[in-house]
Image (cartoon, grey):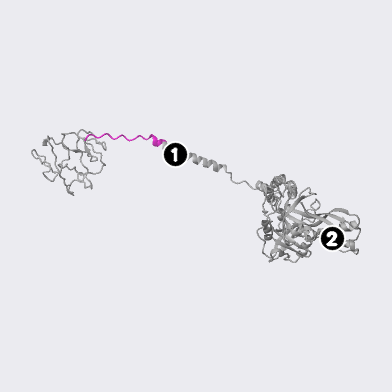
């Protein structure tokens, strides 16, 4: 722990992983029956517990799926030989080492019976042996679980340092499950990449917490051969230092990346040569065992609490850690950080207290209420103006309705017009008179489409048309319809030439006036001034 504190690494980066670190112990339970028929037939029954391995494991999903090394839960030594040596020495009172080696005795008869007791089982065997493996997991909780919980092997590798996958058997941890460790996607490739290792040198206890130390990865190295460690400053022999930790119990422990706090591999080797098994081999083993890495609700709540704690917002961290302990009461890291947060809450070390003090000391800026009042007055003024304009428009008198024109009134647009053209006789087309530039412009105006004069709908009434300028109005002068090319009054059956009435026009707008109109039906000007 001392080297870790002296080295410059981000504080608390291992907090994401250490709650998920567990102690794994594997034991072979051997039930053996010795058949002694040298004299009278005697059956001697014994049961032995033979340690297989121990080390560190990492929980990778809330259901309790774990990963460690194969040699932690599986051994190449034959525990049946160990049981045969032990029972034979105890029953026959001979000296046989309690180990995993086959031995011989000087007494031929006893030696024959001993060899028949060793596996494999023969028809003449003198021993009946049954072996079962028990795996016990001790989680990182407080108070410590002295009995642990049982687990079973889901997958092991073909080499001692291959990954092994475990899962719990018959253990209920509540709906929230177990804390888990985040797994990285790849191993840092840079030479001297800083990492940390974690694990237990024995069963977790109040006086035996997890062990954490620092290391650095060398570039290169992959597969089950592993990556080597090397201090870039050559201040420590990291392979030897970590090898000693492996021999003490950190075998299979997680190697934690220094920036994100994710697991990048497992600690393997031992002695003077500790190495790291990469995360790709770990995830491959998990996939083959059909155990999917996942994070759970405990982890989500814990990460939020850690963010507040490591940014020194201790007041906010207190309820966050309390929530973690509600989900998982034995969470050792949350309990330790909660105690620290409660002690520092509201003190000068609390970032929230510092910010509050800074905001109090700073002079107050311009108040906001004058801007709000000004904006409200501006909106009120705009609304008032709009209402006044609307009311003023609604009170304007409507224009006087246009008086209805008489029978001869014209409703055409007020364009300057030329004198009307008499309607030609049926069957004949009256040519349009040529434009006279010398004519009075107020009377004769050229336009594209001459308007047709209105014809009275009363049967037998004469058609009133404008008198052509220069028309001879002397008595007796009459032009029959169609008799000439110039315009003239048209007469019909039963109409006297002398009865033709002259058409009147308004002197203000030039529109036609009816015979009895006193005012112009278009502009309202009196016809008599």
Residue 199 found in image quarter: bottom right
- Horizontally, residue 377 falls left or right of residue 337, namely left
Give the image location of residue 143, x and y in percent. Answer: 78, 47
Depth check, front residue: 54 or 139: 54
Is residue 482 among the parts visible in the rendering? yes
Type of secondary structure dominating the magenta stretch: loop
- Horizontally, residue 480 falls left or right of residue 156, namely left
- The disc placed on residue 386 is 1
Residue 92 found in image quarter: bottom right
Dot 2, crowdedness within 10 Å: few (<14), some or many (≥20)? some
Q: Is 489 inside the magenta-drawn segment?
A: no
Mark 2 vs mark 1: in front? 2
Give the image location of residue 503, x and y in percent. Answer: 18, 38
Depth check, front residue: 498 or 255: 255
Mark 2, residue position = 116
The magenta segment is 391-407
């Amino acid at each position: 722990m001392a080297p870790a504190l002296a080295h410059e690494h981000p504080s608390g980066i291992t907090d994401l992983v250490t709650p998920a670190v567990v102690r794994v112990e594997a034991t072979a339970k051997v039930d053996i029956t010795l058949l002694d028929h040298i004299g009278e037939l005697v059956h001697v029954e014994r049961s032995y517990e033979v340690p297989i391995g121990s080390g560190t494991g990492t929980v990778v999903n809330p259901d309790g799926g774990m990963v460690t090394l194969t040699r932690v839960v599986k051994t190449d030594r034959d525990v049946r030989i160990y049981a045969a040596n032990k029972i034979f020495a105890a029953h026959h009172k001979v000296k046989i080492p309690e180990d995993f080696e086959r031995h011989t005795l000087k007494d031929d008869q006893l030696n024959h019976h001993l060899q028949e007791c060793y596996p494999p089982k023969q028809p003449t065997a003198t021993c009946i042996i049954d072996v079962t493996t028990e795996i016990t997991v001790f989680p990182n909780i407080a108070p410590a679980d002295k009995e642990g919980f049982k687990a079973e092997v889901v997958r092991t590798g073909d080499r001692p340092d291959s990954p092994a996958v475990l899962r719990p058997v018959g253990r209920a941890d509540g709906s929230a499950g177990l804390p888990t460790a985040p797994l990285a996607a790849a191993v840092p490739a840079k030479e001297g990449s800083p990492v940390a290792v974690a694990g237990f040198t024995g069963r977790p206890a109040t006086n035996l917490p997890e062990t954490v130390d620092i290391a650095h990865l060398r570039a290169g190295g992959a597969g089950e051969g592993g990556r080597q460690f090397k201090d870039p400053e050559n201040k420590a022999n990291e392979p030897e230092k970590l090898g000693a930790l492996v021999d003490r119990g950190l075998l299979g422990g997680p190697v934690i990346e220094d920036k994100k706090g994710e697991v990048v591999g497992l600690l393997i080797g031992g002695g003077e040569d500790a190495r790291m098994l990469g995360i790709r081999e770990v995830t491959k083993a998990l996939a083959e065992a059909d155990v999917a890495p996942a994070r759970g609700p405990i982890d989500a709540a814990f990460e939020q609490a850690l963010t507040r704690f490591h940014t020194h917002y201790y007041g906010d961290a207190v309820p966050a850690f309390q929530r973690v302990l509600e989900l998982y009461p034995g969470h050792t890291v949350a309990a330790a950080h909660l105690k620290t947060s409660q002690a520092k809450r509201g003190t000068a070390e609390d970032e929230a207290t510092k910010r509050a003090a800074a905001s109090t000391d700073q002079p107050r800026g311009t108040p906001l209420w004058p801007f709000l009042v000004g904006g409200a007055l501006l909106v009120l003024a705009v609304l008032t103006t709009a209402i006044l304009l609307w009311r003023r428009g609604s009170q304007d008198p409507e224009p006087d309705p246009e008086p209805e024109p008489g029978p001869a009134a014209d409703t055409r647009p007020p364009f300057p017009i030329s004198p009307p053209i008499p309607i030609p006789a049926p069957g004949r087309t009256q040519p349009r008179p040529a434009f006279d530039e010398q004519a009075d412009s107020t009377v004769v105006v050229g336009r594209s489409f001459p308007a047709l004069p209105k014809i009275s709908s009363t049967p037998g009434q004469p058609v009133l048309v404008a008198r052509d300028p220069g028309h001879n109005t002397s008595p007796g002068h009459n032009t029959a319809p169609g008799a000439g090319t110039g315009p003239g009054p048209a007469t019909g059956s039963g109409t006297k030439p002398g009865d033709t009435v002259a058409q009147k026009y308004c002197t203000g707008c030039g529109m036609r006036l009816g015979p009895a109109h006193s005012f112009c039906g278009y502009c309202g000007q009196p016809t008599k001034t």
